[in-house]
């Protein structure tokens, strides 16, 4: 009995292009005009097309694509995906992105070729075109903040602006007025944390007393802060909010090198509240985005797509501040 599953040729006919052009568009190959690619993707969605060799809907094989398995944030998110998958009797295949956009896109194609039934991208480094092409043939969930929404995909992300505001309020309540934000990236998530930091500082009347050390020269920027603290400069920053825990730990190490005491002289707040926060002394105060919960939500979204949901879904999770030993009393309360 012949399968009724839509074929590549059917997608090509629906879009009014050749099979070769349809294949190039669905695999995000160069040489296809944007209008043509969008027409092919739309046709594939209308027909319910799935790539040759792909698992049938509900077979339950999830492809997971993280930016960097060496980052505790990514491993914590994957733990949440695996927890949900095991409870639901689903399988998980992980492809490591190695912090390389081109490699991430090759790994995405490999996952699709393996016949996964859906993809969870624990990364925002994939191009919108690659994500949209994949989403034309199977469910795709992105964990993180993309610059713009990608049609056909679902998203789970943290409220970065709110998390940054939590960090600023905590430091101000502890008596700090001169604050520094350290960020190592201009990508949408870190950029939103920077915006949240500046907005909350302005709301509290501290806009002229805070500054940002950006990705261009984080080492030189922190050197200036630490030297000012050692000199006892009156306007030296006494608190640092870092865009993630890895950057915050780097600040702790640099402070130790300069014999600047944490938290007596400098308070430090990270972001993620990952496992690394408890591996340093003092333990790192950090904004917790519930990584395992985000992984579970992403896996649930895939299941909703399998069960027939057609509209794109966005889930924004609320962060919580985890106060530990790296933040102390600032000059305003001494």
Image: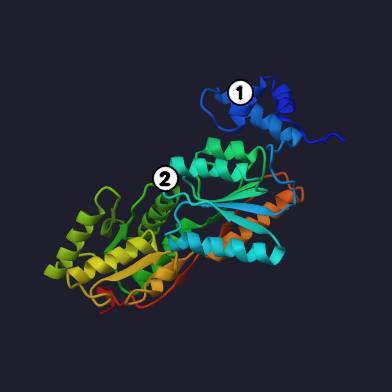
Q: Is residue 332 left or right of residue 165?
A: left
Q: Helix, strand or loop at disc 1?
A: helix
66 or 287, which is in the foreground?
66
The x, y position of residue 5, in whole percent, is 78, 36
Quarter of the rendering containing residue 174: bottom left
The x, y position of residue 146, in whole percent, is 50, 45
Quarter of the rendering containing residue 196: bottom left
- Residue 235 seen in the figure: no
Q: Helix, strand or loop at disc 2?
A: loop
Residue 100 is tagged as 2
At horizontal 51% and vertical 64% (from top left) the residue drawn is 76
Residue highlighted by disc 1: 36
Quarter of the rendering containing residue 205: bottom left
Specify which label sits upstream in the sequence, 2 or 1.
1
Residue 227 is tagged as none
181 or 25, which is in the foreground?
25
Local crowd size for mark 2, using a 10 Å CA cut-off: few (<14), some (14–19), many (≥20): few
The x, y position of residue 157, in whole percent, is 54, 55
182 or 209, which is in the foreground?
182
Q: Is residue 252 left or right of residue 105?
A: left
Disc number lying in front (2 or 1): 2
At horizontal 72% and vertical 44% (from top left) the residue drawn is 310
The coloring applied to the image is rainbow
Q: Is residue 42 left or right of residue 160?
A: right
The x, y position of residue 214, in whole percent, is 29, 51
Q: Real-space Cα distance between discs 2 and 1? A: 28 Å
């Amino acid at each position: 009995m012949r399968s009724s599953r839509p074929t590549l040729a059917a997608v090509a006919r629906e879009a009014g292009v050749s099979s070769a052009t349809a294949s190039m568009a669905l695999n995000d190959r160069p040489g296809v005009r944007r209008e043509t690619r969008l027409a092919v993707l739309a046709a594939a969605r209308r027909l319910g097309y799935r790539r040759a060799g792909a698992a049938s809907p509900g077979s339950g094989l999830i492809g997971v694509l993280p930016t960097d398995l060496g980052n505790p944030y990514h491993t914590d998110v994957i733990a949440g995906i695996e927890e949900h998958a095991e409870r639901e009797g689903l399988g998980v295949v992980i492809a490591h992105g190695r912090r390389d956009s081109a490699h991430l896109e090759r790994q995405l194609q490999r996952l699709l070729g393996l016949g996964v039934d859906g993809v969870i991208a624990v990364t925002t480094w994939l191009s919108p075109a690659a994500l949209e092409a994949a989403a034309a043939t199977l469910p795709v969930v992105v964990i993180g903040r993309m610059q713009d929404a990608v049609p056909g995909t679902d998203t789970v992300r943290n409220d970065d602006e709110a998390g940054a505001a939590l960090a600023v309020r905590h430091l101000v309540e502890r008596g700090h007025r001169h604050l520094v934000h350290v960020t190592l990236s201009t990508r949408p998530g870190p950029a939103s944390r920077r915006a949240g930091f500046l907005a909350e500082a302005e709301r509290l009347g501290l806009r002229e007393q805070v500054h940002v050390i950006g990705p261009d020269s984080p080492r030189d920027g922190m050197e200036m802060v630490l030297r000012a603290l050692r000199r006892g400069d009156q306007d030296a920053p006494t608190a640092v909010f870092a865009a993630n825990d890895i950057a915050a730990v780097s600040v702790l190490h640099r402070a130790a090198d300069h014999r600047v005491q944490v938290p007596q002289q400098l308070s430090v707040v990270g972001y993620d509240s990952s496992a690394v926060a408890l591996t340093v002394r003092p333990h790192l105060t950090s904004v917790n985005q519930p990584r395992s919960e985000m992984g579970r939500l992403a896996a649930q979204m895939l299941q909703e797509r399998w069960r027939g949901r057609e509209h794109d879904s966005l889930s924004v999770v609320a962060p919580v501040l985890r106060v530990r030993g790296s933040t102390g009393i600032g000059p305003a309360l001494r």
